[in-house]
Amino acid sequence: MTIKPILIVPDRRLTQTSQPVSAFDASLTALIDDLRDTLIDCDNGIGLAAPQIGVLLRVFALRIGPDEQEVSPPTIFINPAITHHDEQTETAQEGCLSIPDTFIDITRPQSIQLSYTDEHNQPQSCSARGLFARCLQHENDHLNGVLLLHRLSPLKRRLAVRKVQKSLKPKKNGRPSPK
Ligand code: NI
């Protein structure tokens, strides 16, 4: 069991485009284990994408299913592609493990169709709506180097990054901020 450190903005790896998975080998199995272990270790995390642990491959793990209930172990999505999205949009607050203590209103299509490969190298597709669709789109954005911050104006983005950096600074007694 390996819990990996989660990269925090403004780490440059978070804004790069991840590469498709081409080999279902031992290194992919290790990545899947690391994603699951790291996500399970985060009390407030619903999803985690490989670039967030520094691996620029198109893989993410999600802890909720279509019925918005928790799934255990988290589901793995490899080489996902959104094949259809609803015209109708919905706005809701989103957070991200790579942008601590920050919540941003994001407008997204209400429902999508997603094709992907599962961890057994089988092609899959699913229809998603509501929170499940929102999480799939959030994690898929990570694979394209797109963060919640990219939806803000440059000024608001700089302020948000500064706030995150400030909250991560160690306190005077040397212990990291509990936030
Ligand atoms: Ni995120």
Image (cartoon, rainbow, N blue to C red):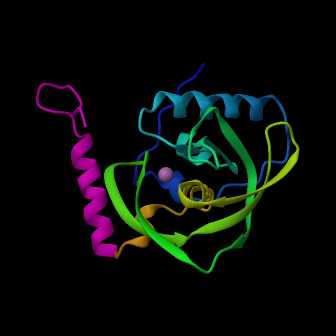
Along the line of sight, the residue nearer the viewer: 67 or 61: 67
Give how far across and how far down residue 109 sits, in percent: 57, 72
Residue 25 shown left or right of residue 107 in the figure: right
Query: Is residue 5 highlighted in magenta?
Result: no
Q: Which of 49 and 43 is in front in this view?
A: 43
Which residue sits at x=57%, y=69%? 110
Q: Quadrant of the C terminus?
A: top left
Q: In the picture provided, is 152 more to the left or to the right than 141?
A: left
Q: Is residue 175 left or right of residue 98?
A: left
Task: Provide residue 71's location: percent of width, then percent of height.
Answer: 62, 35
Whether residue 174 is in magenta: the answer is yes
Q: Which residue lies furthest to the front in this view?
A: 67
Residue 140 appears at what percent x and percent y?
Answer: 62, 58
Can you tell which quarter of the image residue 62 is in?
top right
Residue 136: give x, y in percent of width and height.
61, 56
Which of these two is toward me, 61 or 14?
A: 61
Q: Residue at x 53, y 26 (%)?
A: 3
Residue positioned most to the right: 122
144 versus 72 height, above or below: below
| Above or below 147: residue 6 | above
Image point (42%, 32%), residue name? 43
**Numbered range of the magenta stretch:** 154-179
- For the N terminus, the image quarter is top right
Query: 84 above or below 126?
Result: below
Where is 12 relative to 49, above or below? Answer: below
Snapshot quadrant of residue 80: bottom right
The residue at the point 27 percent across, 41 percent down is 168
